[in-house]
Image (tube, rainbow, N blue to C red):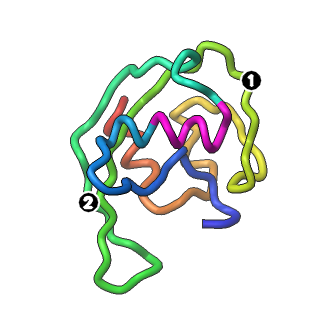
Amino acid sequence: MKGLWAGISGIIEGKEEPLERAKKEIFEEVGLTEDFVVLLKTAPQMEISSPQYTNHQWIVFPFLFAVKEPQLKLNWENSEYKWIDANEISKYQTVPTLDKVLASLL
């Protein structure tokens, strides 16, 4: 959703495991391989209504990662990034329910 702040995300393809897709998306979107991230926590999957499509639900698999070296290389999907304290999320215009997904991991 152009112009809104979001976490790293993607679409699960075929029978992929959500965690493996998350690691692929981290590499694709910010250039970090598995060696540079550590999984801290997972939360139960969440169903989120799509504001873009009528009667459409997204299933979100929340993961929280720590980054060993915060040198990111953004791909074409992103225009900028910013490290923030989780308590500051309400100060940003985000994709729908990002605050709820984040809260499920804290």
Horizontal relation, residue 29 to residue 86: left or right:
right
Which tag, 1 or 2, sits closer to the chain's start?
A: 2
Q: Amino acid at mark 2?
A: Glu
* Label 2 sits on residue: 47
Q: Nearer the viewer, mark 1 or mark 2?
A: 1
10 Å crowding of disc 2: few (<14), some (14-19), many (20+)? few
Q: What residue is disc 1 on?
A: 71
In the rendered image, residue 15, in percent from the top left (x then y), is placed at 26, 51
**Mark 1, secondary structure of its residue:** loop
Q: On the picture, is 13 further left or further right than 92?
A: left
Q: Residues within 10 Å of mark 1 (few under 14, many from 20)?
A: few
Q: Amino acid at mark 1?
A: Gln
Residue occupying the point 53% across, 60% down: 95
Q: Nearer the viewer, residue 18 or 6?
A: 18
Residue at image coords 58%, 29% = 85
Residue 22: x, y in percent? 44, 39
Where residue 81 appears, as percent x and y from the top left, is 72, 41
On the image, which quarter does residue 39 sit in?
A: top left
Please determine whether, in this image, residue 74 is positioned above or below residue 46: above
